[in-house]
Amino acid sequence: MNATQDPTAQAPELTPRLDERIRAALQTRTAMAVILAGLLALIVVLAIVQDVSAGRILSLTVWGIMLGGVIGLGSIGLTLCYGVLKFPNFSHGAMVTLGAYVTFAVMQALPQGEVLRPFSFGWEFLVALIVSMPVVGVVAIGIDRVMYRRLRQRNASLVLFAMASLAMAFFLRSIIYLVWGSDFRFYYEGRANPALDLPFGLRVQADQFFILGLAIVLVIAVYLLLERTKMGKAMRATANNPELAQVRGINTERVVAWTWLMGGALAAAGGAMYGLASQLRPEMGFWLLLPMFAAVIMGSIGNPRGALAGALIIGVAQQVSTAFLNPAYGPGVAFILMVLTLLIRPQGLFGGTE
Amino acid sequence: MPLLKVENITCGYGDMEVLRELSVEVAEGEIVSIIGPNGAGKSTLMKAVFGLLHPWQGAIHFEGRDISRLEPYQIVETGMCYVPQVANVFTQLTVEENLEMGAFVLKDGDIGARKEKIFELFPRLKERRRQAAGKMSGGERQMVAMGSALMLDPKLILLDEPSAGLAPKMVDHIFERIVRINETGLAIMMVEQNATQSLRMAHRGYVLANGENRFEGTGQALLNDPDVGRLYLGG
Amino acid sequence: MDQALVAKSVFLAVPLLLLGLKLVPLRWALRIPVALVGAFVLALIISNLLPSGKLSYLVSFSIMAGIYAILTLGLNTQWGFTGHLNFGIAGFFAVGAFTSALFTTAAPTGVMAQYTQQAFGFEAPFLIGILAAAIVSGFVAFLIAIPVLRLRMDFLAIATIGIAEIIRLIFQNERWLANGPQPLRGIPRPLHCLFDEPSCAPGPLATLLQPLEPRDYIYFYLCVVTVLLALTYLLVETATRSPWGRVLRAVRDEEQSAAMNGKNITSFRIQSFVVGAAVMGLGGGLYAHYAVTIDYSHFNPLFATFIVWVMLMLGGSGNNKGAILGAFIIWGVWSGTAFLTGMIEPTLAQISQDLPARSAYLRWLLVAILLAGIVLYRPQGLIAEEKVVSRFLAKTGIGRGRRKQAREEEAETAS
Ligand SMILES: Nc1ncnc2c1ncn2[C@@H]1O[C@H](COP(=O)(O)OP(=O)(O)OP(=O)(O)O)[C@@H](O)[C@H]1O
Ligand SMILES: [Mg+2]
């Protein structure tokens, strides 16, 4: 699987030393950060050139940070699974969607209470969110038991895992379609959600702050779990070296189950937040898939803080670029950032050079 | 009764046979050295003992208990630990976290005290306790790996080429520590490329070739055996 | 006998003849006449036995299955023979379809230009159109290959999913390119005039076509698709058996050793990716001329990719015959589930009144389960790769060789 082929490696005597040095310099973390910052600056400059007012650019930036929160929630889960299980889970988008819809279903079952001003939602949304997180986590564990665990036992190749996750993406997606149909759904049909008036003419909804706040809280929680608890350390150990983890007495199957639980729960939170910010559609998770993967790769696979950082960068880039680009191309912006990362520093912003 | 008794095991990867009817024994408090050419199956033997591979035939007894069907995480709890030949530390975890992972199966914790014991044995680790293991030198890594394995106070420790790739000075240091560990009553079964040196410190030794047991005897006897010398000790 | 049936049988005989040439186990001198006669007789039997509605269904089914078989062959070149994990098949499919459409239609003028916008329209012949489809699709693949093919396999999968999505976004949003979200209509069908007014055909052909109606055009198009499928098969098969193909497999299975042979691996990897994408583009072109009207929604980034992978996985990756077989079987399953859901619709209605309208997604569900089953129970597919040990067994195969060699060496040293 050693697919990374450096064409220059075959003819070392032809490669000038300077070239190598430039290449090495470009691949440092600093260079990567500079390039990303430059790219964001370029996007802002492009917006200014198109006569977009500074106030609007500021608003877009703030909205971008909020969008980054949604992407971030999804990508923390994705990065954990990627790090521990070592395959890209293409059904993560479907789990995000599932989380949004399970939240919706739970809300339907609950009586509708007071609106928690200044937010647009009531307590029933929070309850539904808290219920849907473990539900999706358990669904993820169930899928693991049926599919991925058997592949693990067989030491199956990465490709089979990827194919299996593609099948599961379709599986979950068709179930969502069957149960809830393809129409738009709203957590609160037709409820007004006025923006707060902030200084500098910023207009941001309180909900958006909630989304960002939740993302930050969950990232901190995940971070503490990984750094301070025994299971968290075992997860990092398993991600780092699964065979040694077994040798040290870690029951890796349990670690894997915990990983899915967390990944699914975080995906559900992301889905519910996304649904709150816009509306529910069966493809919503798929649209997030590309930005999520971009954030994961940019922030180094297996690194939750990195994933959130990547998500924020991608969120801002996507939003600000709408000043001069058709908003539909948001995933395209994420894609370009991802390819750039892969070209410059495939191990991401926070990855070591092992 | 020997501490570890490997009886006539046949074992391999997929359907490729690597070990053929191999028997090895380790008595309590003994250092057993296993030598042999590259690809002889030395590491495979270690993996089979530790449950990473399950023997196709034969049995493995540890303290009289059949462990050949146990998984590694169960074997750890029986009082045996293993330091693999390669990738034997968690490179992304700190030294301290590596040691904690060594004691993962411990439910309640005098983990702090155990860590201190390891730091006594390898003072260098104490200085570097917060450093990621991946950023350490080869010798230091070997210390981390051995330290993690010792965290559980095992009765037997399996070492797969502890001196591989180390500078001569570091090799001496590691061997000296191994003897010291053994003096506390721990049995050691180790694989070594440094055959002469390891046979010299071993109570007994085995020469493996092609997945089969070619010679066995006390360390001194093997050192003096002309065939062993010619074939495996480089003349 | 009904003249229309005879005419239809002549068309049906073409795919059967190709199949016969491949399958009849005789020397070529005998095989050709046997296949020829057999194909025509079989065609006559089929067209006489089946009512005309069923017969047309069978033909349109085979056309779509044939197009998917071409896509699957393209994927086999990339994945089966080189190990590229391309999850963006839908993108190349779309590029091929739109390219061929743009090449063969006329750019609208006057009032029409307000309703239909397209970047250009060359009114080129069909063959030029599908050739362009293959070339442009291959070129797009080339552009993508340079940054992406150096990456790990899982990154390639992610990147290609992204590419398919972006290609779809472009066709959805860029009105000037191919009429944006609106469908692109009136893509010409090759030699359609034969069926509109048979007199435009030369003498004897005209009499043959006389009894046929314009809607019987699909019989002719089936021949077009199967001939191109056969050509693609020959091309891919020859290529993969050539030294080129052997290098590709070497690159896939044991990259290091190929590197030691001094071959330029990256270049080989790019070549196979481009060739595979060109084949997919050809499939897209064929689809456009069959569908006549296309828009971005026909190229759902997940669905097209997904189903082609199911086809290849079922058929057995690395095996071209298996790829074609897998395409026909899976397209059959997919079409069959339409009947199935139609049948259980009343039951569905009892469970929930919304369900019948959503029964299409039940079909997705079934195919998803099918793929999961293949991955779990038959990852090597129906037909395992020929000659070379299948990918999933390769490791032990190589290991055994090495082990034996080691024993021999050991024996020498010992003696
Ligand atoms: N994971 C594996 N899968 C398949 N074959 C393996 C695997 N590991 C080792 N082998 C094969 O098993 C045989 C014995 O390998 P092993 O690692 O036990 O040798 P060794 O005696 O430890 O050699 P060394 O001195 O090089 O460490 C070799 O032929 C090797 O190719
Ligand atoms: Mg070894």
Image (tube, rainbow, N blue to C red):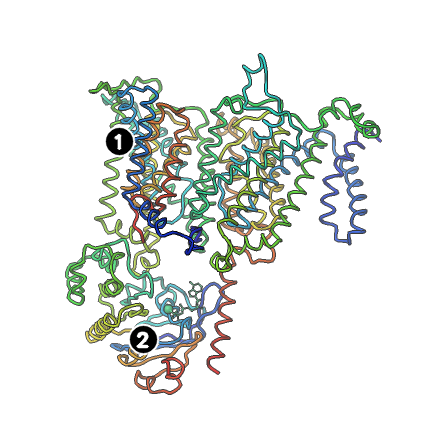
Q: Which residue is mark 2?
A: B194
Q: Residue furthest top?
A: C111
Question: Which quarter of the figure has residue A324?
Answer: top left
Does B9 sit above or below residue A1?
Answer: below
Q: Secondary structure at mark 1?
A: helix
Q: Is residue C216 visible?
A: yes
- In the picture, measured across the screen, residue B125 lies left or right of residue B83, that is left
Q: Are marks 1 and 2 on the same chain?
A: no
Does C405 sit above or below residue C288?
Answer: below
User: How would you rate the neighbour count of disc 2 (Cα within 10 Å): few for under 14, some for 14-19, many for 20 or more?
Assistant: some
Does B41 sit above or below residue A54?
Answer: below
* Residue under the image location 62 percent in, 24 percent down: C105
Q: Which residue is mark 1?
A: A212
Q: Is residue C384 visible?
A: no
Q: Position of residue C331 (x, y in %)?
A: 60, 38
Q: Position of residue C104 (x, y in %)?
A: 63, 27
**What amino acid is found at the position of numbered circle 2 in the picture?**
Asn
> Is ligand 1 less than 8 Å from the beta carbon at label 2?
no
Q: Nearer the viewer, residue A201 or A215?
A: A201
**What amino acid is found at the position of numbered circle 1 in the picture?**
Leu
User: How would you rate the neighbour count of disc 1 (Cα within 10 Å): few for under 14, some for 14-19, many for 20 or more?
Assistant: many
